[in-house]
């Protein structure tokens, strides 16, 4: 059964309901735990996209095993997922590099000795 939650984009959540009629991300009883996780190190951007890709991969695997998707079609789908996963990884690396550059610039600005006007 799919989660009854509505995403920020206004669409119905695509995750499976695990807490009553909601997924962990939308269940009212897990709100406090979500806040704690969000405070600990910040929220991981792109995690939702990665979870969606993994969910789709599992669906294709199950369909191939069940025979509802041909093996060749499944293989092509996995090639597409592989490209998506590589794109997610590149995006993560770019974001990480930008964050490190910002932190380095801040550190450099705090440690660079300021020159006096008198000489």
Image: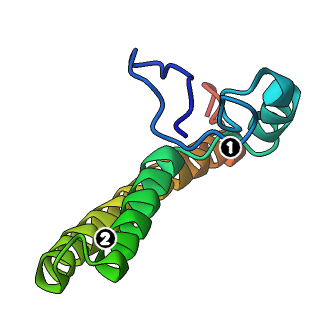
Q: Secondary structure at mark 1?
A: loop
Which of the 4 quarters of the picture holds residue 41?
top right
Is residue 86 visible from the viewing direction of this image?
A: yes
Q: Is residue 113 left or right of residue 91?
A: right
Is residue 93 visible from the viewing direction of this image?
A: no
Q: Residue at x 42, y 48 (%)?
A: 49
Which percent across, then down, holds residue 21? 66, 29
Q: Residues within 10 Å of mark 2 (few under 14, many from 20)?
A: few
- Residues 42 and 64: in front is 64
Q: Which residue is mark 2?
A: 86
Outermost residue toward the front in this view? 67
Which of the 4 quarters of the picture holds residue 72?
bottom left
- In primary-sequence order, the first of circles 1 and 2 is 2
Q: Which residue is mark 1?
A: 113
Q: CA distance from mark 1 to mark 2?
A: 42 Å
Q: Give the quarter of the figure containing the C terminus.
A: top right
Q: Is residue 18 left or right of residue 98?
A: right
Q: Is residue 36 left or right of residue 103?
A: right
Q: Give the quarter of the figure containing the N terminus.
A: top right
Q: Residue at x 86, y 35 (%)?
A: 33
- Residues 33 and 20: in front is 20
Q: Residue at x 70, y 40 (%)?
A: 42
In the rendered structure, find residue 32 and report the number of the disc placed on it.
Answer: none
């Amino acid at each position: 059964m799919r989660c009854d939650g509505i995403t920020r984009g206004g669409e119905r959540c695509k995750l499976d309901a695990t807490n009553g009629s909601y997924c962990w991300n939308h269940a009212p009883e897990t709100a406090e735990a979500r806040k704690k996780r969000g405070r600990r190190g910040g929220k991981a951007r792109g995690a939702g996209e990665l979870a969606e890709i993994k969910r789709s991969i599992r669906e294709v695997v199950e369909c191939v095993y069940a025979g509802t998707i041909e093996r060749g079609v499944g293989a092509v789908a996995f090639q597409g997922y592989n490209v998506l996963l590589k794109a997610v990884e590149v995006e993560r690396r770019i974001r990480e590099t930008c964050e490190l550059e910002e932190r380095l610039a801040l550190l450099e600005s705090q440690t660079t000795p300021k020159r006096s006007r008198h000489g």
